[in-house]
């Protein structure tokens, strides 16, 4: 049964803060400080935020199990294939950049694994060179390598990491500066600066202002933040009369390549997150206003309930006509915010119903029946991301309880002798396994869980901010 009525609690302000959490947020980010202050609230005085050291130790041990598999089979390469004991590169065949090493660096620091953090820094300093004659995807390079080097620098203070970050970002800038619309091309050759790929999803156009903004802060060079902001402004200008965005844009012509508004799903998710983040981190009022506008539109045209559970339908961005009622597992992390927001909690409970049904959340569901339509799981971290955000905003034990169940199922179904791997069908018992550990596992899954239970002294829970890839861009404490 579909019901588009939300009741009195679903106010405009409520939707604003419900969407504020974004993947991290959609792929994994968020803040713990300013949203509470901005909403006139904080963690309830009755909240129990005491660490649970025993569970934190178990999570840390499993991270190390995954890490040992990477070191054994793939050290210096981008990603490990833990079942076959092989490796693969993520960005360009034959051009490893140690992606898992960069992704893991700030997780090691937060967990107090200083020897491993030092090992990562030594490899990066000795081996990482971005003078590569190959096309790198700008979005993934930004959230993974630029973000990872930034958080690594903030964790360790090693200037060489910041220098590498500047070098890499300078190589990415032609994707922005050579565009006739200010929206970046999808690929750039890191050696020659040649750009390619004119059809981009919204998230890839609008997910750079946090990393580029922090780099501008650290270097005093405004070029990076300015390029990211121009891309955002160009995209926002092309919204429909309903204040909705379609999914893919031709950045050469400035024309939409489709009509589907698929928020809060990928590939648009982190665009909304980074609007909010720009306000949170840089006091960007314009981004805050844009976020409010889009949040209102999403609530009006896409939010609905099915059998009491909250979901977001895909619609035509110009007319609002329904296109699809499918939802991606990545969408869960778009709503993790404060304790007075029923809508955020409702959406988390929708995905908890999926977790209850399958034990491991499938890649995509038909939410009218909670049916898995893409039954694999690529070791997605978004549910753990959302649990972390909601727990530290509310102090409600429900989020820790469900996060622990996620962890137990992760360990039961994804663990192999060589680390952690994807599963290909969550509907089967036992779940068949693939042979791939994405590098983001070292940046996200275990980090979100560890921060939920550990009370990590190297993270400022009151003011910290993590990117969509789980990189700590604010609130890092050095040893």
Image (cartoon, rainbow, N blue to C red):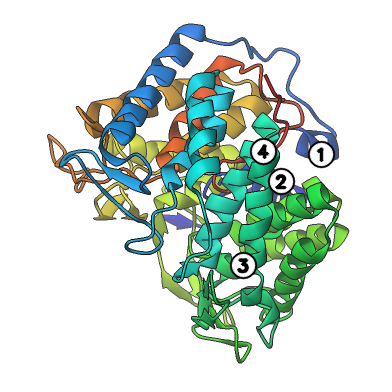
Q: Nearer the viewer, mark 2 or mark 4?
A: 4
Side of 354 relative to 194 (left or right) = left
Which quadrant, please, contains the C terminus?
Answer: top right
Judging depth in this view, the residue of 347 and 285 nearest the camera is 285
**Label 2: which secondary element:** helix
Q: Is residue 116 above or below residue 365?
A: above
How far separated are the C-alphas under marks 1 and 2? 8 Å
The reply to whether dot 3 and dot 1 touch (C-beta < 8 Å) is: no
The reply to whether dot 1 and dot 2 touch (C-beta < 8 Å) is: yes
- Which residue corresponds to the image point at 73% horizontal and 23% vertical from the top-left? 43
State the image coordinates of residue 421 (x, y, percent, origin top left).
26, 39
Residue 17, labelled with which disc? Answer: 2
The reply to whether dot 2 and dot 3 touch (C-beta < 8 Å) is: no
Q: Nearer the viewer, mark 1 or mark 4?
A: 4
How far separated are the C-alphas under marks 2 and 3? 36 Å
Q: Which residue is mark 3?
A: 171
Residue 39, labelled with which disc? Answer: 1
Q: Which residue is mark 4?
A: 153
Judging depth in this view, the residue of 133 and 355 nearest the camera is 133
- Which residue corresponds to the image point at 69% horizontal and 35% vertical from the top-left? 154
* Crowd around label 2: few <14 · some 14–19 · many ≥20 (10 Å): many
Q: Is residue 371 above or below residue 477?
A: below
- Mark 4 / mark 3, whichever is N-terminal: 4
**Label 4: which secondary element:** helix
- Mark 1 / mark 2, whichever is N-terminal: 2
Q: Residue furthest bottom?
A: 253
How far separated are the C-alphas under marks 2 and 4? 31 Å
* Crowd around label 3: few <14 · some 14–19 · many ≥20 (10 Å): many
Q: Nearer the viewer, mark 3 or mark 1?
A: 3
């Amino acid at each position: 049964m579909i019901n588009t009525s939300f009741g009195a609690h679903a106010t405009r302000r409520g939707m604003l803060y419900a969407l504020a959490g974004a993947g991290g947020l959609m792929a994994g980010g968020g803040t713990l400080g300013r949203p509470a202050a901005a909403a006139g609230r904080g963690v309830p005085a009755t909240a129990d935020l005491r660490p649970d050291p025993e569970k934190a130790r178990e999570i840390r041990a499993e991270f190390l199990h995954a890490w040992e598999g990477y070191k054994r089979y793939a050290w210096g390469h981008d990603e490990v294939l833990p079942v076959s004991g092989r490796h693969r590169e993520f960005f360009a065949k034959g051009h490893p950049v140690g992606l898992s090493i960069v992704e893991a660096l700030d997780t090691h620091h937060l967990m107090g694994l200083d020897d491993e953090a030092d090992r990562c820094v030594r490899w990066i300093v000795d081996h990482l060179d971005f003078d590569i004659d190959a096309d790198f995807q700008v979005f993934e390079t930004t959230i993974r390598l630029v973000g990872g080097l930034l958080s690594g620098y903030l964790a360790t203070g090693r200037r060489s990491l910041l220098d590498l970050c500047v070098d890499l970002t300078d190589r990415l800038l032609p994707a922005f500066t050579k565009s006739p619309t200010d929206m970046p091309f999808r690929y750039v050759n890191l050696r020659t600066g040649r750009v390619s790929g004119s059809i981009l999803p919204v998230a890839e156009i609008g997910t750079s202002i946090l990393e580029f903004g922090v780099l501008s802060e650290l270097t005093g060079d405004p070029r990076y933040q300015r390029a990211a902001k121009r891309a955002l402004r160009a995209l926002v200008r092309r919204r429909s009369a309903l204040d909705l965005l379609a999914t893919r844009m031709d950045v050469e012509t400035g024309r939409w390549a489709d009509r589907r508004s698929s928020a809060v799903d990928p590939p648009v998710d982190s665009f909304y997150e980074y609007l909010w983040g720009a306000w949170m981190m840089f006091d960007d009022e314009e981004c805050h206003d844009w976020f409010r506008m889009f949040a209102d539109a999403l609530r009006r045209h896409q939010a609905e309930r099915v059998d009491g559970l909250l979901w977001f339908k895909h619609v035509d961005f110009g007319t609002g006509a329904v296109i699809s009622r499918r939802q991606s597992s990545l969408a869960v992390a778009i709503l993790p915010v404060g304790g007075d927001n029923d809508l955020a909690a409702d959406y988390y409970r929708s995905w908890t119903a999926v977790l209850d049904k399958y034990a491991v959340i499938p890649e995509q569901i038909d939410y009218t029946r909670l049916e898995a339509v893409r039954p694999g799981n690529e070791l997605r971290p978004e549910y753990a991301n959302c649990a972390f955000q909601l727990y530290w905003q509310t102090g409600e034990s429900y989020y820790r309880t469900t996060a622990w169940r996620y962890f137990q199922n992760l360990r039961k179904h994804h663990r192999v002798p060589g680390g952690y791997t994807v599963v290909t069908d969550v509907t089967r018992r036992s779940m068949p396994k693939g042979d791939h550990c994405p590098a983001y596992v070292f940046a996200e899954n275990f980090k979100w869980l560890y921060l939920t239970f550990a009370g990590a002294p190297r993270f400022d829970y009151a003011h910290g901010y993590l990117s969509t890839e789980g990189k700590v861009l604010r609130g890092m404490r050095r040893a």
